[in-house]
Image (cartoon, helix red, strand yellow):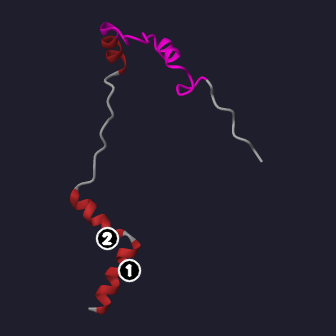
Amino acid sequence: MMSAPPPDRDAWHFIAAEEAATRLQASYDDGLAEDEVIRRRAQHGENRITPRAGKGPLLRFALQFVQPLVLVLLVAGVVTA
């Protein structure tokens, strides 16, 4: 039986907060200087999650009828009517 590979001890969730700040070239107590924030935003962009385009209410309603059990119940209702 194969065993899982050993955890990567350099991963962000394994290192201490002070070490993470050092690797990010930031101060643990003060964070980033304002000019460094502006530079990094210009380089990497805003720290935002891109919103997904959601399904509209009509499509969500229509998708309710695609489920197998709902289709069986609809067919049974039509047959008995």
Horizontal arrangement in the rendering, residue 81 relative to residue 66 (left or right) = left
Q: Up-down: is 42 above or below 47?
A: above
Q: Are marks 2 and 1 in contact (CB under 8 Å)?
A: no
Whichever of labels 2 and 1 marks the residue nearer the N terminus, that label is 2
Check residue 26 for magenta coloring. Answer: yes
Q: Which residue is mark 2?
A: 65
Viewer-nearest residue: 1 or 19: 19
What is the quadrant of residue 7 in the picture? Answer: top right
For the magenta stretch, what is the residue range?
Answer: 10-36
The C terminus, quarter of image: bottom left
What is the quadrant of residue 58 in the picture? Answer: bottom left
Q: Which residue does the image show at 31% across and 43% down from the upper left?
A: 52
Amino acid of disc 1: Val
Q: Which residue does the image show at 25% across and 64% down from the upper left?
A: 61
Disc 2 packing (10 Å; few <14; some 14–19; many ≥20): some
What is the quadrant of residue 49 in the picture? Answer: top left
SS category of the residue bearing label 1: helix
Viewer-nearest residue: 35 or 16: 16
Horizontal arrangement in the rendering, residue 41 relative to residue 25 (left or right) = left
Q: Which residue does the image show at 31% across and 64% down from the upper left?
A: 63
Q: Which residue is mark 1?
A: 72
Disc 1 packing (10 Å; few <14; some 14–19; many ≥20): few
Residue 59 at x, y percent in the picture:
26, 60
Q: Which residue does the image show at 37% across and 20% down from the upper left?
A: 44
Q: CA distance from mark 2 to mark 1?
A: 10 Å
Q: Up-down: is 17 above or below 48?
A: above
